[in-house]
Image (cartoon, rainbow, N blue to C red):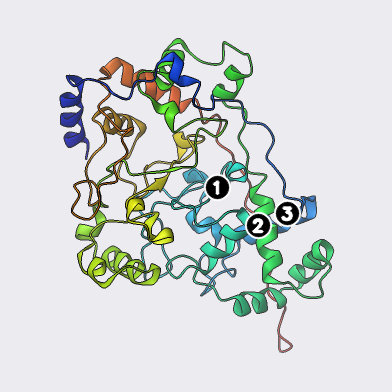
């Protein structure tokens, strides 16, 4: 991907930048801001016991189909609490069809997954644990497994007051744990809170580009550096769909399962993104603006993991994005007007990358829990 993008960036360097944001336009967008404390929903208040239970469940593969796939399977702490491959790890015998996003700071988001199909962490957890190419779990099976684990019976009764664990309470506990996965003391947070020594000169120069010439602020704004809106950037289709038979099968399955017309099923070679949810042609190829926080640890990038480092991402934007099945008008022409050649120099791209890295701070390390055993059989 890199050689093509470098060539495209070279072409872009002589083009006129149309994405520049002037001082007057900046007021249209929420400014970057320090990240405060995460919001806690009134119907799922935090407690130490609930968070600890959620942590154990997050690591427990018995909360899944064949007891082999846990939340942590696709959100590994040493891989940015995501998964370090272009497409996420899938249920045994499958490959997932999109890149795994980090769970760090997801407590602040109102839309989860690349197409925003879950409105809360409480809804995201079951969608992943029960997704056919993800956890593939069944409610009754997972609930029964937990009922045969004495420690879970004790912990669920303490937290939720039930005689036996209920699967809905398991999602609430996992969401409570995920709301503790917060990194809000990054160099960007410190700088925006008044510590002008928190960013290097190179990073400050990158921030000026972010807010001006590069135009990043148009979509990556506010405390989370995302407007949670949807855009088609022209990200090319996943390369693995061209050469990995298992990945092709998963993609075709998702087209069928999420619903497209027969003509689209036969012709589509790319992920229609938000279209799956709305069935609006204007939404083909659009994905939610991802937050920029913690991204230093979450490569590869984009919904299909097309780019392997932040420099490659910046080169892509500098070239004015790319082309995919939804940019030439054959299927759709939804590429965002905001994506234009930027004309950034090599030095400016380095400055922008340095600033993007300042959104991440130190890695968040958590000791994995010890999973409780099943109840012993009478014969044991």
Q: Is residue 8 above or below residue 289?
A: above
Cα distance between the residues tagged 1 and 2? 11 Å
Assess whether mark 3 and mark 1 are in contact (beta carbons under 8 angstroms).
no
Residue 294: % across, % down:
51, 36
Q: What residue would you read off at disc 2?
A: 174
Q: Secondary structure at mark 3?
A: helix
Residue 244: % across, % down:
24, 61
Residue at (38% x, 22% y) in the render: 352
| Mark 2 burial class by Cα count in 10 Å: few <14, some 14-19, many 20+ | many
Cα distance between the residues tagged 2 and 3? 9 Å
Earlier residue among tags 1 and 3: 3
Quarter the N terminus occupies: top left
Assess whether mark 2 and mark 1 are in contact (beta carbons under 8 angstroms).
no
User: In front: 123, or 61?
Assistant: 123
Earlier residue among tags 2 and 3: 3
Residue 207 visible to an observer of this rendering:
no
Cα distance between the residues tagged 1 and 3? 17 Å
Q: What residue would you read off at disc 3?
A: 52
| Mark 3 burial class by Cα count in 10 Å: few <14, some 14-19, many 20+ | some
């Amino acid at each position: 991907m890199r050689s093509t993008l470098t060539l495209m960036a070279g072409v872009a360097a002589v083009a006129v930048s149309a994405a520049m944001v002037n001082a007057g336009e900046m007021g249209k967008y929420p400014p970057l801001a320090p990240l405060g404390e995460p919001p806690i929903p009134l119907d799922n208040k935090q407690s130490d016991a609930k968070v600890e239970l959620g942590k154990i469940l997050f690591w427990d593969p018995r909360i899944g189909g064949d007891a082999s796939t846990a939340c942590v399977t696709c959100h590994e702490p040493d891989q940015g609490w995501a998964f370090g491959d272009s497409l996420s790890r899938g249920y045994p015998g499958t490959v997932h069809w999109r890149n795994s996003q980090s769970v760090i700071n997801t407590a602040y988001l109102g839309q989860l997954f690349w197409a925003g199909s879950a409105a809360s962490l409480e809804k995201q957890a079951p969608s992943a644990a029960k997704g056919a190419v993800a956890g593939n779990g069944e409610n009754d099976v997972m609930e029964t497994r937990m009922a045969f684990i004495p420690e879970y019976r004790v912990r669920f009764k303490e937290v939720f007051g039930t005689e036996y664990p209920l699967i809905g309470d398991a999602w609430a506990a996992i969401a409570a744990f995920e709301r503790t996965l917060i990194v809000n003391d990054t160099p960007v947070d410190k700088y925006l809170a008044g510590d002008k020594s928190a960013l290097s000169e190179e990073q400050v120069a990158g921030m000026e580009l972010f807010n001006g010439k590069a135009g990043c602020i148009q979509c990556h704004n506010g405390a989370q550096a995302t407007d949670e809106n949807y855009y088609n950037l022209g990200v090319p289709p996943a390369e693995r769909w061209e050469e990995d038979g298992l990945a092709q099968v998963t993609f075709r399955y998702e087209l069928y399962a999420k619903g497209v017309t027969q003509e689209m099923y036969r012709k589509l070679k790319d992920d229609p993104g938000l279209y799956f949810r709305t069935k609006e042609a204007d939404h083909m190829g659009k994905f939610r603006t991802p937050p920029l926080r913690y991204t230093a640890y979450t490569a590869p990038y984009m919904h299909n993991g097309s780019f392997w480092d932040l420099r490659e991402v910046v080169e892509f934007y500098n070239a004015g994005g790319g082309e995919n099945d939804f940019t030439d008008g054959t299927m759709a022409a939804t590429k965002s007007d905001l994506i234009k050649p930027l004309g950034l120099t090599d030095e400016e791209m380095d400055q922008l990358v340095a600033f993007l890295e300042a959104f991440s701070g130190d890695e968040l390390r958590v000791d994995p829990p010890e999973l409780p055993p099943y109840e012993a059989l009478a014969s044991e």
